Amino acid sequence: MKRTGPFTNRSPIVLASGSPRRRELLSDLGLTFDVHPSPLEEPSPKPDERPADYVLRMAELKTLDVAAKFRGATVIGADTAVVLGNRIMGKPHSKLDALDMLEALSGETHQVVTGFCVVLPDGAIFSEAVSTDVDMRVSTEGELMSYIETGEPMDKAGAYAIQGVGTFLVTAIRGSYTNVVGLPMARLLEMLLKYGIVTPGNV
């Protein structure tokens, strides 16, 4: 099947994440890759751990776990958190938990922080955290409950998806849009181009 994206990979790529959003972002570039999520449990943040440090720790944990099984490939992993003040929001555990998150975010500006990790075929490891500011509209409890009933919030950090139904919650962003989706593509692509993992061209 002919690639339609603007890039091609010169070596095997493994995505250490089961996220459909991350799969779509990589596919849109024209890359071919295998998907092998890490089965490791994600520990909670340490006391006083900065959000950027936490998502980097999670991204590295999962990526290195998968890279150990796929030596000679480029392995990419990531972890995303929604941060409001000092509160790190992961995926909600229940509908009430989702409502609590969305009510806290309503009318506020929060940060979406994604840590990504790349293990190159020679074993070199690179990781970085990227942050995007997101402004949310003021929403009523009824609006938020109706959104929660769609089911979309239940597997999303912060209980919303900017690229899905949850787009109605967002009034503005400052920074990388794809970072909010789950992978800062411009920064990741810079790294993959720099080390010759991908190259322009769809042949």
Image (spheres, rainbow, N blue to C red):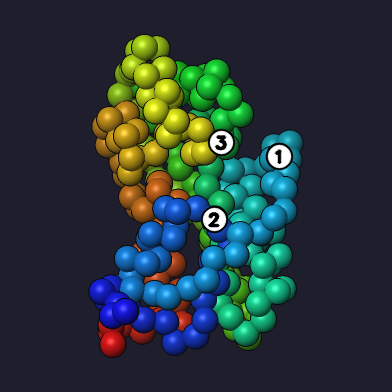
Instruction: Identify which amino acid the numbered label 2 is placed on.
Output: Gly
Identify the image quadrant of residue 14: bottom right
Task: Describe the element under mark 2 as helix, strand or loop.
Answer: loop
Question: How far separated are the C-alphas under marks 2 and 3?
Answer: 14 Å
Picture quarter with the C terminus: bottom left
* Residue at position x 39%, y 28% in the image: 150
Q: Report x, y in % for residue 76.
A: 54, 67
Sort mark 2 into few (<14), some (14-19) or many (20+) by Cα contacts within 10 Å: few
Question: How far separated are the C-alphas under marks 3 and 1?
Answer: 12 Å
Mark found first going from the N terminus, 2 or 3? 2
Sort mark 1 into few (<14), some (14-19) or many (20+) by Cα contacts within 10 Å: few
Mark yes or no: residue 170 visible.
no
Instruction: Identify which amino acid the numbered label 3 is placed on.
Output: Lys
Residue beneath label 3, please?
91
* Residue at position x 53%, y 42% in the image: 81
Mark found first going from the N terminus, 2 or 1? 2
Sort mark 3 into few (<14), some (14-19) or many (20+) by Cα contacts within 10 Å: some
> Horizontally, is 59 left or right of 104 in the view?
right
Residue beneath label 1, please?
44
Question: How far separated are the C-alphas under marks 2 and 1?
Answer: 20 Å
Viewer-side residue, 5 vs 63? 5
Seen from this angle, which residue lies furthest front?
Answer: 1
Identify the image quadrant of residue 78: bottom right
Task: Describe the element under mark 3 as helix, strand or loop.
Answer: loop
